[in-house]
Amino acid sequence: MNDGAGSVEQALSGGDVHELLRVWEDFNRGETWREVSATGSDEARVAAAQFLAEVREVAALEALRANAKAVKLLTARRWYVIKSAREAGATWAQIGEALGITKQAAHDFYRRKIEEQEKYLPDLHDAAAARAVLEEAKED
């Protein structure tokens, strides 16, 4: 088996969102090829067997753990992308729309994250810059 991306356990214990997403994708590709192997033509079964021999095995629970950890990491990092969007002129309504939530929910999420940064990482956080984008623009 070729698992050039490292072991599943290493990915799950680390904080690299790309590795976590690879675990998720490996599981999904494996599921697709297992289905092809079970239902496809003889030629498709040969291709599936070859693919399955080369891909790392990922259990469903490992895939779910990777998914949950990746979502948590991405959500935790969302605040600074919101800050960048605001600094680039995006309105809270536009940010909310991009996230699939209301402008108020986007604003509240960002405010809570800034408060957490100020509380837990005061020395590593530029509170003034982070809070500057909280102000409502006239077109919001």
Image (cartoon, rainbow, N blue to C red):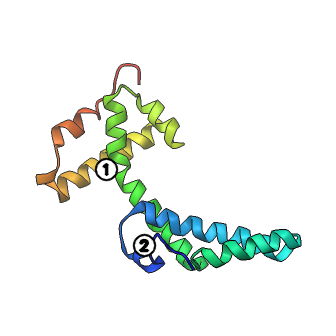
Residue that numbered label 2 is attached to? 11
Please tell me the numbered disc located at residue 112.
Answer: 1
x 61%, y 75%: residue: 54
Label 1 Cα neighbours within 10 Å, binned few <14 / some 14-19 / many ≥20: few
Q: Amino acid at mark 2?
A: Ala
Q: Earlier in the sequence, mark 2 or mark 1?
A: 2
130 left or right of 40 in image: left
Q: Residue at x 79, y 74 (%)?
A: 46
Query: Height in image: 62 above or below 140?
Result: below
Which of the two residues, 10 or 102, is positioned nearer the viewer here?
10
Q: Which residue of the protein is positioned furthest toward the left in this rendering?
A: 123
Asked where in the image residue 136 lies, by quadrant, the reply is top left
- Farthest residue to the right: give it: 41
Mark 2 Cα shell of 10 Å, populated few (<14), some (14-19), many (≥20): many
Q: Position of residue 66 (x, y in %)?
A: 49, 70
- Label 2 residue SS: helix
Give the image quarter of residue 41. bottom right
| Left or right: where 26 falls relative to 8 | right
Q: Which corner quadrant holds the N terminus?
A: bottom right
Closer to the observer: label 2 or label 1? 2
Disc 2 from disc 1: Cα separation:
29 Å
Q: Amino acid at mark 1?
A: Arg
Q: Quadrant of residue 130?
A: top left
Of all residues, the one furthest to the top in this rendering is 138
Relative depth, front residue between 61 and 36? 36
Residue plotted at (65% across, 66% down) = 29
Location of residue 104 in the rendering, given as x and y in whole percent from the top left corner: 43, 38
